[in-house]
Amino acid sequence: MTYQSRLINGDDPAITKLYGERTALTSCKYLLPYVKPNSNILDVGCGPGIITSNLAKLAPQGRTTGVDNSTGIIEEARKAFPTSAVPNLKFVTGDCNNLSEFADNSFDIVHAHQLLCHLPDPVPAMKEFYRICKPGGLVAARDSSPSIVLSLKPDLPAIRQYWVRAMAIMEKTGGHIDAGLKLEGWAREAGFGSDGGNIVTSVNSVYYPSHLSRVTGEPAEQAAKLGLATKEEMDGWAEAWREWEATEGAEFVFEAGEVLCWKGN
């Protein structure tokens, strides 16, 4: 499912609940060794701003900006992390495919977490990242490949069925269920690697929380209205997610790809 199709709203509580546990340590550990105290950072697709605020605190002498296309989620981020608490941090509404509010060569680091997988064509966004990154600067992206499930405990058939349906919808609406495998290719299409800068990739894992909030309440009603699933299917998936939540040691793990792209001098 992709944000571009508006089947998912960035400020939907069911979505922010899924993303609220993400931190810089859990979601961009691969990037942290390159964050300097004076780094100027842009976090694209910042969501509720937790990762963004973490990065700002690691670079107190620089400026960190979070940008997202959802006005609602930007307002939430501003309330959660006011400038009075994090003076070098601000949040703005913007489009990752057109970051014209930022000048060329503006940022030491451009970061995107779980953004590119939702874009029908991620290359224009990567070209914008390249443009606004300073020569010698770094673009970092991490995206899961949710079609590659590394672990599901307990391995419940109803959750497997739900996930097959979710992957089909994601592909149908322009998302990429194997985004983690495509990051280097998208980066090279955007111009990275052809200017003398290095590209480094890595493979990791990403732990996902329960999707109970996506198959109950308003999200379930909307899915039924759109013909994405029947009420009976939603009820069965909800029962499975409740069982999953109640199981000690439950986990839902996908493969994730990471890419670090240095812009040539």
Image (spheres, rainbow, N blue to C red):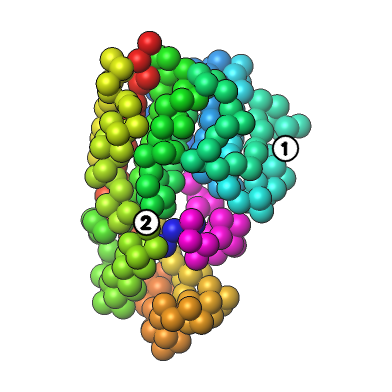
Q: Estimate the x, y position of residue 165 in percent, counting from the top left.
A: 33, 72
Q: Where 196 falls versus 17 (above or below)?
A: above
Rendering quarter of residue 183: top left
- Residue at the extreme top: 265
Helix, strand or loop status at disc 1 = loop
| Residue depicted at 61% across the width and 31% down the height | 101
Q: Please state, as top left, top right, bottom left or bottom right, where the N terminus lies in the image.
A: bottom left
- Residue at the extreme right: 84
Q: Is residue 178 left or right of residue 246?
A: left
Rendering quarter of residue 53: top right
| Residue depicted at 38% across the width and 43% down the height | 122
Q: What residue is disc 1 on?
A: 82
Q: Where 79 falls versus 177 (above or below)?
A: above
Q: Which mark is residue 175?
A: 2
For mark 1, does the 10 Å Cα neighbourhood hold few (<14), some (14 to 19), or many (20 or more) residues?
some
| Residue depicted at 26% across the width and 59% down the height | 147
Of tags 2 and 1, which is closer to the observer?
2
Helix, strand or loop status at disc 2 = loop
- Residue at the extreme bottom: 232
Looking at this view, is 91 or 197 the one in front?
197
Q: Where 263 falls versus 239 (above or below)?
A: above
Calculate the distance from the C-alpha at mark 2 to the C-alpha at mark 1: 33 Å
| Residue depicted at 31% across the width and 38% down the height | 186
In the image, what residue type sits under mark 2? Gly
On whether residue 40 falls in the magenta region, the answer is no
Please tell me which of labels 2 and 1 falls first in the chain. Answer: 1
Q: Estimate the x, y position of residue 119 in percent, counting from the top left.
A: 41, 50
Q: Where 134 falls versus 146 (above or below)?
A: above
Report the magenta residues as a range.
4-22
